[in-house]
Image (spheres, rainbow, N blue to C red):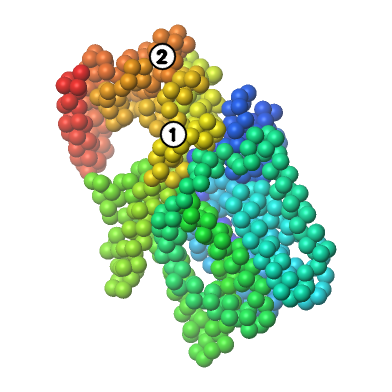
Amino acid sequence: MAAGLGLSLVLLLLHAWAYRFQCDDAFISFRYARNLAQGAGLVFNAGFERVEGYTNFLWVLILAGAGRLGIPIERAADGLSLAATVALWALVAWFAGRRGRAPVFALVPVFLLAATRSVAVWSTSGLETRWFEALLLGGVLRLVVEVEAGLAGRPSGHAWAGVLLALATLTRPDGLLISGASLVAASALLVVRQRLERRWLARTLLPFAALVGGHLVFRRLYYGEWLPNTYFAKIDGLTWWDSGGAYLAAFGLEYAAYLWLPLIALGVVRHARRGSPEVPLLFAAAVLPHALYVAAIGGDHFEYRPLDAYFPFAFLLVADGLQELARFRARAVSVTACLALLVVGLWELPWQSHLQFPGSYASGFPGMALAGDAPGRDFLDPARDPLYGLPGLRAIAATHRDLLRTTTSRFVGIRQEEHRMFLATAVAQARLLEGLVDRGILTRDLYMAVGSVGAIPYVTDFRTLDRHGLTDAHVAHSGFALKELSAHGKVATFAYASARGVDLWAVDPVRLVVPVTSRRLLAATRGRYPPGEEPYAAEVAPDLYLLAQLPRGVEFESRRLPALRLRKTSDPTFIREYRARVTSAFERAIEIVVANGRPQDAERLRRQLAAWAVDSTGLDAAR
């Protein structure tokens, strides 16, 4: 038993290490934590307005504590997440080994955890996900223990469930729904059996109410709101059932829920037969209302992040189902076959999604990359899968692929691989901007407006206007401009940026500095803009341009940033120079890849150059 447990933990950590990453959004919390650690308070822009642009209060406090100890916050985050993964594994191992499970069945949940991509993915990321899950699972499992004791009429010991569930709620707001549903279900079970003790209820609810209520009062006093700013920026009462349904369906097909749901049903039968219905009932109370909530809000921007908490509950019941199955004839064969099918189902589509994911960054892949993009069209084609290409399974793979196309086209369910590559682009951009500060081209007190406020503001420490409102209350409380994109529907106006005194409004949604071959730069030379909103460009390095609109005007910024040679992108002289630079850049790139023996890349660059030449033919006419 001990050897099996140790092996499962090793496999889980190896799997987690294979998917290690951090996402750009984590750096929002990192910036809040750093500001708190440095004495600036729980704010995004140090020295300016208070806005609750995070949804992980306890996580930010913990990271701030690491910062105060001198530990780099971004490094501490992954260490803490991996530690929480070990805690999650330990909780599952402990609960699976109790109440008479045979050792072989007690090992099933921990090995299933080790085989599951989603569990591995959310073992890092920099987000609060695994910390939340460990606290939530600990709270629900402890609640099971306390209810069992109450039903048996024996003391339950310390009432820790309320504290753990409260800490989970402080880590992520949807913990309130899960905790509330679990506590109501537990109380109802005890009431029905006439075993509810007021002392237990008080010892559970009072700490929960004190912690959760205290944080609510703090939010109101510190930020002036009862709800976090991110609620208004992302949801604000909007329901999106079709997207949420697709998100849940894609999750179910990707992880072969059609294989483990029958085993869960058998697990419920086993608990009913053994007189312990409180286990599946409390698990259901923790999962089902939350799943309905996830469907209502349209899913999540991240790959199955809110659904990842369901796996421990599901796998514990799967183990019970397998043990129930073992009561019947041919039990060894049936149990082994079911377990093998389950592992293959959990592994195959997630692994193929990793193998087939392209090696270069594309936004909203595959849904936003389908038009004219072979990788987007070919991604998870059933014909490319040795298993799901078989007759009878092709329909499952094809449906899963179509669901992924639907969700990612709305910026829902974006894969780990894309987030990892996006962070690399954001960090590279931040380093470029840092270099411009070091060279005296930009100032440290620059005020910029961008649509991605993670690593770039964290590294540069620039004052930043979040164009999607996560860290800006005015934008968050405005109306939805883009209802079709998850978590990106609120959009700041240029007039608001001007009123706030923004220096540079990035024309590209993320980057202030773009390569000369950027289509955003090409579009800036062709577009027609209202007076005062014209884009300006300044060459800051060979084939690199700072591209921005200037809410305070070119005269003001020329005085404030004199080292920038700002030129209107519609200026004919600039356009002639720009054309020559683009052609030269493509030709140099083609020479390099040909010299390195990469003819396919050379052909791709030639096609891009030809497409750019076609797109740029209207420049003269547009003037």
Q: Is residue 446 above or below residue 172?
A: above
Numbered mark located on residue 553 in the image:
2
Marker disc for residue 491: 1
Residue type (three-letter) at the residue carrying disc 1: Val
Would residue 220 appear left or right of 323 to someone viewing this image?
right
Q: Which mark is residue 89?
A: none
Q: Where does residue 12 sit, x and y in percent of width and height?
A: 55, 60
Q: Determine if residue 77 is in view.
A: no
* Residue in the image at 63% along x and 80% along y: 272
Residue 184 pos. (x, y %) = 68, 63
- Out of 266 and 126, give the one closest to the viewer: 266
Question: Could you tell me which residue is drawn at 40 percent across and 43 percent down?
Answer: 483
Residue at the image point whose x is 52% and y is 35% from the top: 477
Q: Position of residue 565 (x, y in %)?
A: 37, 12
Q: Callout 2: few (<14), some (14-19), or many (20+) C-alpha neighbours within 10 Å?
A: some
Instruction: Please tell me how crowded label 1 is: few (under 14), some (14-19), or many (20+) other residues with Cα within 10 Å.
Output: some
**Percent position of residue 530, x then y:** 32, 20
Tell whether 338 sits left or right of 269.
Answer: left
Quarter of the image where the N terminus is located: bottom right
Q: Mark 2 belongs to which amino acid?
A: Gly
Residue at far bottom of view:
329
Q: Nearer the viewer, residue 407 or 116?
A: 407
* Dot 2: element: loop
Q: Quadrant of the C terminus?
A: top left
Mark 2 or mark 1, earlier in chain: 1
User: Residue 599 appears in which quarter of the rendering?
Assistant: top left
Tell me: residue 437, above or below residue 341.
Answer: above
User: On the rendered structure, is 561 left or right of 397?
Assistant: right
